[in-house]
C-alpha cells in the first residue's frame, strides 16, 4: 500500500502500486493538466474554467454607466 499526495491539490491517495494510478503522481487527469499548464504557461490556470466572472463584472460596470445616462 502506497500513500501519495497530489502535488497540485494536496489530496491523499492510497494505492497498491503506482500502476493503479495512471495519472501518478497526480490524483486525477485534471490535476495533471493543471501541472502541465503551469509548465507551459508559467501561470496557474485551470483549463476549462469559465472566464465569465471577469465578463460579468465588466457587464456590471457597463450597465451602471448606462444607468447614469438614463
Ligand atoms: Zn489533485
Image: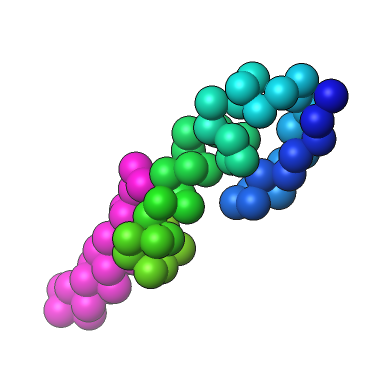
Please determine whether, in this image, residue 24 is positioned above or below residue 56.
Answer: above
Residue at x-position 71% and y-position 49%: 10
Q: How many marks?
A: 0
Where is residue 11? Give x, y as percent.
72, 41
Residue 53 lies in the magenta stretch: yes
The quadrant where residue 41 appears: bottom left
Where is residue 8? Give x, y as percent.
60, 51
Looking at the magenta stretch, what is its main secondary structure? helix
Residue at x-position 73% and y-position 44%: 5
The quadrant where residue 40 appears: bottom left
25 to the left or right of 34: right
Residue occupying the far right of the picture = 1
Q: Is residue 39 visible?
A: yes
What quarter of the picture does the C terminus occupy?
A: bottom left
Question: In the depicted view, which residue is nearer to us: 1 or 38?
Answer: 1
Residue at x-position 27% and y-position 68%: 58
Where is residue 4? Give x, y as percent.
75, 39
Please determine whether, in this image, residue 13 is positioned above or below residue 52.
Answer: above
Where is residue 7? Give x, y as percent.
64, 51
What quarter of the picture does the N terminus occupy?
A: top right
Instruction: Please provide the residue range marked out in magenta.
Output: 46-70
The quadrant where residue 68 appears: bottom left
Question: In the depicted view, which residue is nearer to us: 31 or 62?
Answer: 31
Residue at x-position 45% and y-position 50%: 34
55 to the left or right of 10: left
Please determine whether, in this image, residue 1 is positioned above or below residue 42.
Answer: above
Q: Is residue 53 visible?
A: no
Colour pattern of the rendering = rainbow
Amino acid at each position: 500500500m502506497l500513500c501519495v499526495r497530489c502535488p497540485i491539490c494536496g489530496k491523499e491517495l492510497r494505492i497498491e502500486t503506482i500502476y493503479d494510478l495512471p495519472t501518478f503522481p497526480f490524483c486525477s487527469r485534471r490535476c495533471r493538466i493543471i501541472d502541465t499548464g503551469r509548465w507551459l504557461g508559467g501561470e496557474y490556470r485551470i483549463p476549462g474554467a469559465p472566464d465569465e466572472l471577469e465578463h460579468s463584472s465588466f457587464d456590471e460596470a457597463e450597465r451602471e454607466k448606462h444607468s447614469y445616462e438614463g
